[in-house]
Structures are given as structure tokens and as C-alpha cells.
């Protein structure tokens, strides 16, 4: 249910979306307490635009460069001095809205981390490292994202504070979606790191994936999430393997296969 205009929280919610027809309407409605919701989309071929507008969002299209650039384009259109960023697969809550209202009224920090409660294959994951998921999502509209294609950051000179209420996050509807996202992410990560001069050798390719499996399962407590945690630990290792394999491929194909091409990471 949409709150009356005078009762809404004076914040602009920004959502970047591409072919998110299955998610976008519920996402927008979950923050109906916000005074403004802006959806920036790129090249959607489904009903993302129509469904976002039907839910009450302002929608515009912007050519995709990076996720940070998409969000920056939407922030530039914001009518309110505070920004709350969501992904289409995230949901706000009324409790989050109430805390956002209190925090921006206090006006003592420039940015806030927002905890995320994460679900995987129908179960909330309380360990496996996912319990440490606290991205910066609430900040002043004068701030902007950097240009990195992955692990984008808000550029701020002060340490972000922390909200208590959480976003609800269901990042993967199924394993096919996970691997589709992994393909894009690992390529972008490799391109980003290759541009910085980073290279990978055989030892890294052999040791990093099993190290990530073990650290996720034991040190990060994946075993406490049962079979879901075991699968997440396996997928974490697969993700590391994919990233470093892409990075190795870039160095190998662009620089030849001489002994100087494979530097320690």
C-alpha cells in the first residue's frame, strides 16, 4: 500500500535494471514509503519499463557502461538530498523506511552501510560469509560511484555508518541464473584486473579455488548452513576459478606464452 505523499520518507530510491520484469514491480512497491523511486534501465526486451511505471516509479533509459554509471545517471535526476540504492532482486521493508527517515533527520553521516539478509534456493543463509554483507546503500545525493565495472564503490571521504534494519535479498532464482551472472562478473573482474597489470600463474590457478572452498565452508561458517552452505562453498570456489581462468586467458592470449607472461598474482 502506497503511503500518502506527505507521509513519505524524503529519499530517492535508485534501481538499475535490465530485463527485470519478474522482479521490478515487487522491488518498487517494497519501497512505496519513499518520496521518489527512479528506475534506470538499459536495452530491456521484456516488460521491465511498463511494470516499473505501473508500480509508481519514474523510468528512463541510459546506455550501459558500468553499474556505477547507471546509478550515477539516476542520482543526477534525484529530487531529494538522500539516495537509497536497491537492486531489482532486493526488497525494502517498512522498518527500513522508518530507520532511513530517522537517520536522514539526524543528518550526522554522509553514507550508511545497509545489512542484507540473503536467501539461496529457498533458505536464508546466516553464515558462509553472507552474514557480512553490508554494502553502502544510503548516502547523500552529492556522492557518486567510481568507474569500476565490478566492486563499484561510493566515493566518500568519511567512513560510512551502519543501519540496523536490513534489505531482503534473493540474488539467484536458480543455479542457471547464478552461472549466467558468474559469466558476466568473472569476465568483467578479469578485464578490470588485467588493465591494472595483474597477472596469474599456475600456482594461483591450482591453490586459490580450493582455498576459497575451505575458507567459506569452515572459517566463514558455511557448514552451519548445512547442505546449502556446502553448495555455496563449492560455488565460491567455482567463482574464484572462473575469475582467475579468465585473467590467465587475457594474459596468455594478448601477451603470448613466454615465461615472462605469467607473473605471480
Image: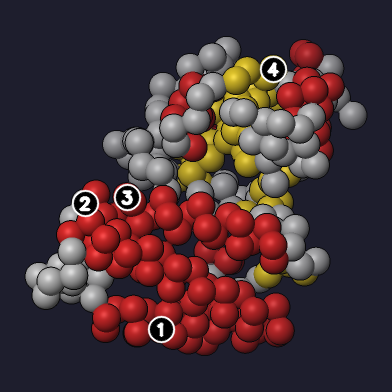
Q: What label does residue 58 carry, if any?
A: 4
Q: In the image, is residue 61 above or below residue 239?
A: above
Q: Is residue 232 left or right of residue 260?
A: right
Q: Position of residue 107 (x, y in %)?
A: 49, 28
Residue at (68%, 58%) from the top-left corner? 177
Asked whether the residues under the numbered discs 1 and 3 touch, taking CB atoms below 8 Å apart as contact, a structural biologist would say no
Q: Residue furthest right?
A: 1
What crowding class fits label 2: few (fewer than 14 Cα within 10 Å), some (14-19), or many (20 or more)? Answer: few
Mark 2 lies on a secondary structure that is loop
Label 2 with label 3: CB-CB less than 8 Å? yes
Q: What residue does disc 1 label?
A: 211
Mark 3 element type: helix
Residue 45 screen position, x and y as percent: 71, 31
Secondary structure at badge 1 equals helix
N-terminal label among 1 and 3: 3
Left or right: residue 7 versus residue 113 is right
Image quarter where the N terminus lies is: top right
**Badge 4: how crowded within 10 Å, few (<14), some, or many (20+)?**
some
Dot 1, crowdedness within 10 Å: few (<14), some or many (≥20)? some
Amino acid at each position: 500500500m502506497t503511503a500518502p505523499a506527505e507521509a513519505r520518507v524524503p529519499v530517492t530510491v535508485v534501481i538499475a535494471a535490465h530485463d527485470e520484469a519478474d522482479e521490478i514491480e515487487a522491488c518498487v512497491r517494497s519501497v512505496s514509503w519513499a518520496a521518489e523511486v527512479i528506475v534506470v534501465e538499459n536495452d530491456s526486451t521484456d516488460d521491465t519499463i511498463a511494470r516499473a511505471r505501473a508500480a509508481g516509479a519514474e523510468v528512463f533509459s541510459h546506455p550501459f557502461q558500468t553499474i556505477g554509471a547507471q546509478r550515477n545517471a539516476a542520482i543526477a535526476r534525484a529530487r531529494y538530498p538522500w539516495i537509497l540504492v536497491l537492486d531489482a532482486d532486493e526488497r525494502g521493508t517498512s522498518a527500513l523506511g522508518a530507520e532511513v527517515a530517522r537517520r536522514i533527520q539526524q543528518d550526522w553521516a554522509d553514507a550508511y552501510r545497509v545489512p542484507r539478509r540473503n536467501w539461496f534456493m529457498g533458505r536464508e543463509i546466516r553464515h558462509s560469509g553472507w552474514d557480512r554483507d553490508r554494502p553502502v546503500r544510503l548516502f547523500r545525493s552529492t556522492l557518486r560511484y567510481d568507474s569500476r565495472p565490478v566492486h563499484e564503490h561510493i566515493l566518500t571521504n568519511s567512513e560510512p555508518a551502519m543501519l540496523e534494519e536490513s534489505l531482503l535479498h534473493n540474488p539467484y532464482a536458480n543455479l542457471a541464473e547464478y552461472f549466467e551472472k558468474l559469466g558476466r562478473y568473472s569476465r568483467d573482474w578479469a578485464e578490470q584486473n588485467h588493465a591494472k597489470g595483474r597477472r596469474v600463474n599456475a600456482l594461483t590457478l591450482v591453490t586459490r579455488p580450493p582455498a576459497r572452498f575451505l575458507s567459506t565452508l569452515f572459517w566463514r561458517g558455511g557448514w552451519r548452513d548445512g547442505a546449502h552452505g556446502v553448495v555455496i562453498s563449492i560455488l565460491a570456489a567455482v567463482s574464484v576459478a572462473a575469475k582467475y581462468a579468465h585473467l590467465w586467458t587475457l594474459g596468455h592470449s594478448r601477451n603470448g606464452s613466454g615465461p615472462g607472461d605469467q607473473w605471480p598474482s
